[in-house]
């Protein structure tokens, strides 16, 4: 039973989501403020955090940033508007996905399970080892190293790099990446892909502003190139 931390300040929404997720088989702890959320994250170490953006005290963006300093636990944002700048800021802060309010429990449960699958992905079908200069992507162990030093990636960042590494030199559209990485069965939101690529470049590129590995293919998406 996956352990989740639900952070939502509205009591009625918090209770409704908690009941729905519990019925879906999740173990849910709840917090109403940013300060309480950080305390519970540190003491309980949940497998996933469902995080409202607008909170009293410390907001969801800052919580996300603080967690990401030391922990790669999956984070799903709850946001009031899909076209809000909050989505972009949240994704750039390190969130793995987002769900728009009012929350549909089945949608949230599907997103949670998809992120947890990425977090636990590995096993015999994960593939082999891909080498890009001093960057090594071990698809069996689901680890990434540069010059022998491990690189800490979130489950979504790791899944994105693994999928790109399976097809070196091949351009993958944002729609393809949404299906492969996020398990979205619709065209979805390209901001998920773009924000994750930006975070991934910051970790694997020597000069993130001048990427040599993860290339943008204008009008299409991205490809992973071997170093020249």
Image (spheres, rainbow, N blue to C red):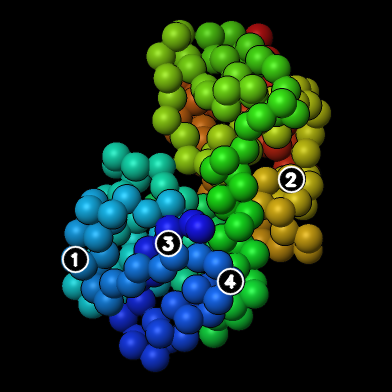
Q: Where does label 1 land, which residue? A: 35
Within 10 Å of disc 1 (Cα), the crowding (few <14, some 14-19, many 20+) is some
* Residue occupying image coordinates x 43% and y 24%: 151
Q: CA distance from mark 2 to mark 1?
A: 35 Å
Quadrant of the image occupied by residue 9: bottom left
Q: Position of residue 228 (x, y in %)?
A: 65, 9
Q: CA distance from mark 4 to mark 2?
A: 24 Å
**71 horizontally vs 208: left or right:** left
Q: CA distance from mark 4 to mark 3?
A: 12 Å
- First reached walking from the N terminus: tag 2 or tag 1: 1
Q: CA distance from mark 3 to mark 2?
A: 24 Å
* Residue occupying image coordinates x 70% and y 17%: 128
Q: Position of residue 59 (x, y in %)?
A: 28, 68
Q: Say if 147 sits above or below 83 in the image.
A: above
Q: Position of residue 51 (x, y in %)?
A: 40, 66
Q: Where does label 4 land, which residue? A: 24
- Is residue 89 among the parts visible in the rendering? no
Tell me, yes or no, whether the two marked residues, 3 and 2, touch with CB atoms within 8 Å.
Answer: no
Callout 3 secondary element: strand
Tell me, yes or no, whether the two marked residues, 2 and 1, touch with CB atoms within 8 Å.
Answer: no
Q: Where does label 2 land, which residue? A: 180
Callout 2 secondary element: helix
Q: CA distance from mark 1 to mark 3?
A: 17 Å
Q: Where does label 3 land, which residue? A: 4
């Amino acid at each position: 039973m996956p352990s989740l931390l639900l952070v939502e300040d509205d009591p009625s929404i918090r209770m409704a989501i908690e009941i729905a997720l519990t019925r879906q088989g999740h173990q849910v702890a709840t917090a109403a403020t940013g300060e309480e959320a950080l305390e519970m994250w540190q003491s309980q170490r949940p497998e996933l955090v469902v995080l409202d953006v607008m909170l009293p005290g410390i907001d969801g963006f800052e919580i996300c940033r603080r967690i990401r300093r030391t922990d790669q636990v999956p984070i799903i944002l709850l946001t009031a508007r899909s076209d809000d700048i909050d989505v972009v800021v949240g994704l750039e802060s390190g969130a793995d996905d987002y769900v728009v309010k009012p929350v549909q429990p089945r949608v949230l449960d599907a997103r949670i399970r998809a992120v947890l699958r990425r977090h636990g992905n590995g096993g015999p079908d994960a593939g082999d080892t891909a080498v890009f200069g001093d960057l090594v992507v071990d698809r069996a162990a689901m680890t990434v190293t540069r010059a022998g030093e491990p690189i800490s990636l979130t489950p979504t960042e790791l899944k994105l790099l693994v999928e790109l590494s399976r097809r070196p030199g091949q351009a993958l559209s944002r729609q393809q990446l949404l299906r492969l990485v996020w398990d979205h069965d619709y065209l979805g939101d390209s901001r998920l892909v773009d924000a994750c690529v930006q975070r991934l470049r910051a970790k694997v590129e020597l000069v993130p502003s001048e990427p040599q590995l993860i290339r943008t293919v204008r009008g299409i998406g991205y490809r992973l190139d071997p170093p020249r």
